[in-house]
Image (cartoon, coloured by chain):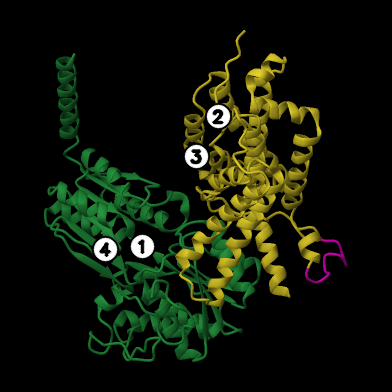
Chain colours: A yellow, B green
Amino acid sequence: MELVEAIILSVLAASTPLLIAATGELVTERSGVLNLGVEGMMIVGAACGFAGAWLTGSIFIGALFGIAAGTLMSLIFALMALGLAVNQVATGLALTILGVGLSGLIGAGFVGERITPAAHLHIPGVTDIPLFGRVLFGEDGFVYVSIALVIGVSWFLYRTRAGLILRACGDNHASAHALGYPVLRIRTFAVMFGGACAGLAGAYLPLAYTPFFIPGMTAGRGWIALALVVFSSWRPGRLVVGAYLFGAVTILQLHAQGWGVGIPSQFMSALPYLATVVVLVLISRARSGGSTAPAALGTVFVPDR
Amino acid sequence: MSKSLLALAAGLLLAGSISAASAADKLKVGFIYLGPIGDLGWTYQHDQGRLALVKELGDKIETTYLENVPEGPDAERSIEQLVRAGNKLIFTTSFGYMDPTLKVAKKYPNVHFEHATGYKRNPNMSTYSAKWWQGRYIQGLIAAKMSKTGVLGYIGSFPIPEVVSGINATMLAAQTINPNIKVKIIWANTWFDPGKEADAAKALIDQGADIIMQHTDSPAAMQIASERGKLAFGQDSEMIKFGPKTQLTSILDTWGPYYIERVKAELAGTWKSEDSWGGLDSHMFAMAPYTNMPDEVKKMAEDAQAAIISGKLHPFKCPIVGQDGKPVECKGGDHLDDGQILGMNFYVKGIDDKLPGK
C-alpha cells in the first residue's frame, strides 16, 4: 500500500511540469499561434526561478521570477512572430536555442548551490490517512496550482465570452478581425500566458523536483509538453489524461525495471511516448474524428489598416 | 559575378591562412564536450582537466572547447570545426564520439585525436579511459557493510560494457561481505536528465534499496537519497554538497595529469597513437574522502584501495561465475584480462535481472 502511494506521489511530481507548460501552450495555440519555444522558456524559467529563490530564500518569489522570465521570453516571440510577422516555427525554434544559452548564462553563478525545496501541504490527521492522504492533501503548491490552472483554462475557453473570442482568433483570424476584435492583442496575451506557464513549469524543476540548478535540466520536457497539446487535440481535459498518463508510464517503467521484469530497458524508456500517443489518438478518434487543430494555427496575420 | 565571388573566397582563404600562421607558435588544443561545463559531473571534470592543462602549459598552448555537442553523426561537424580552426590535438570526451572522431581522423592525418572511453584507434587517434570498476569494487564493499536492508539500488545510464563492468565489480565486492546481497538496477537510458535520475532514485528507495549508486551524471540521485535519509555514492565529481550526511564516497575523474602528459608529448613531437587505460595507481581517477561511515568500514575501504593500487587485489579475480552458473573463461591468468572487462556484456551470478539486449 505504501508503495502504491509512493508511486502515485512520484507520478504527480513527474507530470506536473508537463501539465503546466502544456496548459499554457494550449491557450497560445488556441489563439492561432504556434510557439515552439516552450523548452527555451522553461529552461529560462528554471534558471530565474532558482536564482529568485536562492537570493530571497522564498520559493514563492522564485516561482514569480520563473513566471516573469517565461513571460519576458514569450514577449520576444510575440514581438517577432506577431509584431513583425516572422515565421512562427522559425521564431519558436530560435527562442528555444536562445533560452538554452541564456539560462546557462543566468544560472552559471548558481550551479552547485542548493535550496530547501517547496514545502508540502500538511494537515494534521488528514494528510496522514493511509493511501490517499498524502496524495490529496500532502502535495507541494505547484501541484495544486497546476490543477487549478487546467480547470481555470477549461472554464475560460468554453464558458466565457473572452474564451470564445480567443478561439475565434485561432480558427479564423480574418473573421475575428472583421468583427472588430483586436486579433494581435488577443494573441499577444495568449502568447504571454503560454510563456508565464512555461516559466512556472520550468521553475518547478529546481524549486520542487530536484532543488538545484544545472544547465539543460529541463531535458526536453518542453518538447513533450508541445506534443501533449497536439495529441490532446487541443482540449484541456484530454491534456490532463495525457500528462498524467505520460508521467505514470514514466514512473511505472522505472519500477518495472527495479522489479526486474526482464523487458529491455530501451523499450521501457520509449514506452511513455508510445502509450501516450496511442491512448490520446484512440480517444480523439472515438470521440470526434478528424483534425481538431485551430484552423488558423501557425499562420501569420497582418491586419489591413 | 562568379569571378568576384571567387576572388573574395580566395581573399578569405588567404586571410584565414595568415591568421593561422601567426598563431602557429602556440599549439592549439581542442576539446569536445557532451554536456555543459556546469553539469557538475562528466563534462565539468573534463573541463577541470583542461584548466589544469592551461595552468601547467598555458604559455605554450591555446585551448578551445565546444560544449553541448550531441553524440552521433552530428558530432562530426563540431570536430571538423575544431580542425579547421587550427587545433592540432583534439580531445573528444564521450563514448558516442567514437565513429565521428575516427572519420575525421582519417580525413586529417596530420591532426592528432584523443578519444575518451572508446576502443577504435588510428595512427593519429588514441584512446584513453579509466578503470573505474576498481573504484566500483571499493564502493561495493562499503555498500554491503552499510546496507541494512541488503538491497542496493543502482541507476545505470546505458547498458554498455563500462557500466556493466561497474555493476559486476560492485556485486563481486558486495558478495564477499554479504553473500545474499541484492541489487536492483534501473536504466535511465540517458546520461543526464536530473528529473529522471531523481525518479529512478525514488523508485529504488520505494522498492527497499537503502544505498543508491549511480552511473549517470547529475547529483539528483544524491539529493533524493539525502532527502529520504539513505546513503549514496557520487559519480564523476565531488557531490558531498548535495548530501553532506549521505555521500559515502565518489569516483572522481581526474583527467588533468593525462591531458598534461599528452600535450607535453605533442609539444615534444613524441605523440604516438596509444591506448591508455589507467587505474587508481595511475591517478586517472581518485576516490573522494570516505565519509558517513564507521571507522572500521573506512579502514576496510582504504585497505582495499591500497591493495588495488599495489596490484594485490584484482576486482575481477577468477573464478568469476556468470548468471548461468558457469565460470567465465579466465584469459588474464588469475583474473579476467582487460579485453574481457572492456567488452563485458554479462552479469555475474547473484544479480536477479536480465541484462538488456541479452
A191 left or right, relative to B266 = right
Say which of marks 1 and 4 sits in front.
4
Which residue corresponds to the image point at 51% horizontal and 65% vertical from the top-left? A268
- Residue A298 image label: 2
First in sequence: mark 3 or mark 2?
A: 3
User: Image point 49% across, 83% down: which residue?
Assistant: B352
Please name the amino acid that badge 2 sits on. Gly
Q: Is residue A126 magenta?
A: yes
The earlier-in-sequence mark between 1 and 4 is 4
Give the residue pinned by disc 1: B254
Q: Secondary structure at mark 1?
A: loop
Of the numbered discs in the image, which one, if any, rests on residue B128? Answer: 4
Q: Is residue B130 left or right of residue A31?
A: left
> Measuring 19% from the left and 61% from the top, which residue is drawn there?
B121
Residue A278 figure quarter: bottom right
Q: Per the image, is B285 magenta? A: no
- Residue range of the region highlighted in magenta in the rendering: A122-131
The answer to whether B200 is drawn above or below residue B317 in the figure is: above
- Locate residue B276 relative to residue B201 in the image: left or right: left
Q: Give, as a three-letter code, the residue at label 1.
A: Thr
